[in-house]
Each structure stands twice: as structure tokens, then as C-alpha cells.
Image (tube, helix red, strand yellow):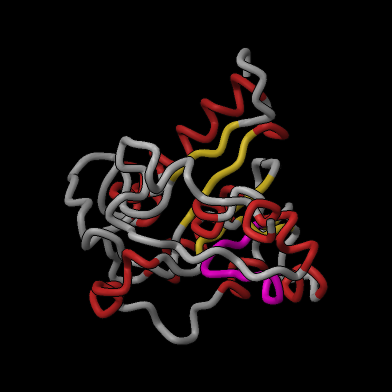
Amino acid sequence: MAAGFDGVEIHAANGYLIDQFLRDGVNQRKDEYGGSVASRCRLLLEVTDAVIAEIGADRAGVRLAPFSSTWDCHDSNPGALFRHAVTELDRRGLAFLEIVEQINESELSKSAAAIPDDFTTDDLRALYRGPLILNGGYDRERAGAAITQHRASAISIARPYICNPDLVERFEAGAELAPMGDPQVIYGGGDRGYIDFPTLAETTA
């Protein structure tokens, strides 16, 4: 916050540390951080409360990925797990909750995720009363529809930004997006795949 950022998003998704505590497929602990759904959610809520104590709930958000399994980080009953987590987060008056509906890295492990067909974003939306951000393969049309239909307060878009530094301008103009290019060089340490994507103005020129 001292550096001038607007807030902090706690990354509790995509197989990283907090997600590993949440999921019983990897959390084999026997202490107060393992076992029941409530116990596995303990670290997430303690971290959230610690961040809130530092900067306020109105500056804190949380990112969850209930419908994907990354790096074999899966759960036997994701519906019960994430319903509990979202219910608890709702009580904290966060600036927002971000739900990742799908991620590319999870494609090979969807069978391991065992996500029931009747567990959807709607289940979590019904439990969360604050601003909800959705993420997961959204393009201009789908993002606009989700907001217009009040399914989300906002849509977060990641990968298209890598190769479209002027994504907002392209969306506004209804222009075609630049292709992703070679994924092997994306953020690979050099200029290629990092700062060499042309803007729409450069492309049309």
C-alpha cells in the first residue's frame, strides 16, 4: 500500500499454497489445518483476516478456483469446500471475490478434479453478496454479457493482455486481437514475448 497500490488480492487458487491447504487431495495434515472443511479453510481465513487488519476489508480481495484442478491439487467434495469458504469470506465485507471458472493448465487434470455437474458459479454467487469478479476465457462479448446480465460486477482478463497491451482500446473499437504467438517465449526473460507485441495503431499503420 505504501507503494501506491489500491489494494491486495490474496491468491488462494491455481494450486498455490493456500489452495493446497484447502484441498483434501493434497492436504493430509492431522492438526487444526487439516481434516474437516472448516479446518482446511483455516489458513485462507487467517491470511484474509491478517490482510484486513493491515489495510482494511475494503482494500482486500480473494481469488479462488473452485472448478479447476491444477498440479493435481483436487478435492473430493469441492462443492462443500468452496460453499463454506465463500460463506466465510462473505462475512468479511471484502472489496471483491474473484472466481476462476476455468484455467488452461487444468485441462489435463479435470478428471481428477471430479467437479460435480450441479456445482456452478451460481451456487457461489448466491452465497456472496459483495462485488464478484469472474475469470476464465472471457472475450469481449462474453464479458459484456456477464456484466449486463448481472452475473458479475467485473470480468478479469489475463492472457489476451500479454499480446494485446492495448486490449481496452481494441475492445472499444471492436478490433481483432493479436494472436498469442509462441508460448515458449512468453515472459521468458527477454524482449521477445514480453514487450514486442504491436499495438493496434502500429498494426494498422
Is 15 or 196 nearer to us in this picture?
A: 196
Residue at position x 50%, y 61% from top?
A: 100
View extreme (front): residue:
205
Residue 108 percent coordinates (x, y): 24, 74
- Above/below status of 2 relative to 168: above
Residue at position x 37%, y 54% from top?
A: 14
Is 144 or 199 nearer to us in this picture?
A: 199
Point out the stretch of residues depicted in magenta: 133-143
Residue at position x 61%, y 28% from top?
A: 52
Whether residue 48 sits left or right of residue 13 in the image: it is: right
Residue 46 percent coordinates (x, y): 46, 33
Please state, as top left, top right, bottom left or bottom right, where the N terminus lies in the image: top right
Is 9 or 94 nearer to us in this picture?
A: 9
Residue 138 percent coordinates (x, y): 59, 69
Q: Quadrant of residue 191?
A: top left
Residue 142 sits inside the magenta stretch: yes
Please state, as top left, top right, bottom left or bottom right, where the C terminus lies in the image: bottom right
Whether residue 60 sits left or right of residue 171 in the image: it is: left
Residue 38 sits inside the magenta stretch: no
